[in-house]
Image (spheres, grey):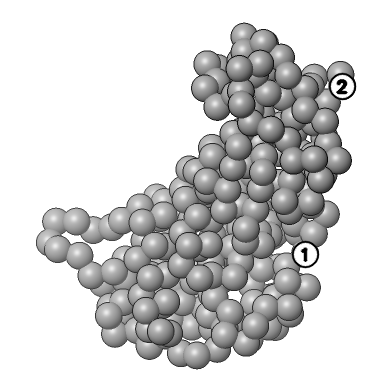
Amino acid sequence: MEWIDELSRQTRKRSDPWIVLEGRHAVEGAISGWWDVQGILAADDCEWMLPIWSGLELTRVERKMLEQVAGYAFHRGLIALAKLPDERRDVASLMKELPEDARVVVCPSLADASNAGAIVRNAAALGAQAVLFGDEGVSPYERKAVRASSGALFRIPIRVADGGQILRCLKAAKFRLVGADGGEETASLESCEWDEGRVALVIGSEDQGLNGFWKAACDVRVRIPMVSGVDSLNAAAASAVMLWEMKKARG
């Protein structure tokens, strides 16, 4: 089958418009979200059943063959190939559709796919309405990111676009930009007023934080107060802390 050959290629090096779905949460999320699932492989000892309403077919193979396709000892027993939604780059339309008190997370240049997936999971769990990723960084559709999101990738809108386009769309939609910045000259998170209205939390890269472009773009920059000797949290942990503070402030 052609889709199995493509799946095997994508497990080794993913490229748009494809996404590899590993495990029940990812496969069920894509099916429920009506993504274009090309095919699903299941190990012969996998007990998972395909929902009848999906209109799809499940191909069962020996576990050894499944592991050859996956590229490693694959314990989940379920893997699939899907095409990404066409609207994945349409930031402007999404921003217009969001509510007046919307909260979104912006990640212009993350380098680590696991962080990208964890931030998507945090955003979905703590009330954000969307996550925007810059072309300059890692794709949230990489295998590690999809795994780290634990299915949240299919429960919250995700967009990937040029950083300049993301900023223009946010400003046009009247979002207030709050940047996560560990610099001493920034305000403490405890003093930040999470105004009602649209807020975009901007998370910089793991090694450099916010670059000059995004520092200048932010309306306010805040830091998470920490004990002496610890200067930063990783990007995913920082997003969780700040999203929780925002959620708590808004009741």
Secondary structure, mark 2, is: helix
User: How packed is label 1: few (under 14 Cα within 10 Å), some, or many (20 or more)?
Assistant: some
Q: Residue at x 55, y 20 (%)?
A: 74
Secondary structure, mark 1, is: loop
Viewer-side label of 1, 2: 2
Task: Name the disc covering residue 27, or none.
Answer: none
Residue 129 is drawn in which quadrant? bottom right
Whether 45 is drawn above or below 214: the answer is: above
Amino acid beneath label 2: Glu
Image check: 193 left or right of 51?
left
Q: Which residue is mark 1?
A: 90
Image coordinates of residue 13 in percent, x first then y, are 67, 28
Task: Name the disc covering residue 2, or none.
Answer: 2
Residue placed most toward the observer, 220 or 190: 190
Q: Is residue 122 visible?
A: yes
Whether 75 is drawn above or below 180: the answer is: above
Residue placed most toward the observer, 239 or 2: 2
Image coordinates of residue 241 in percent, x first then y, are 35, 66
Quarter of the picture containing the N terminus is top right
Amino acid beneath label 1: Asp
The residue sitting at the left extreme is: 228
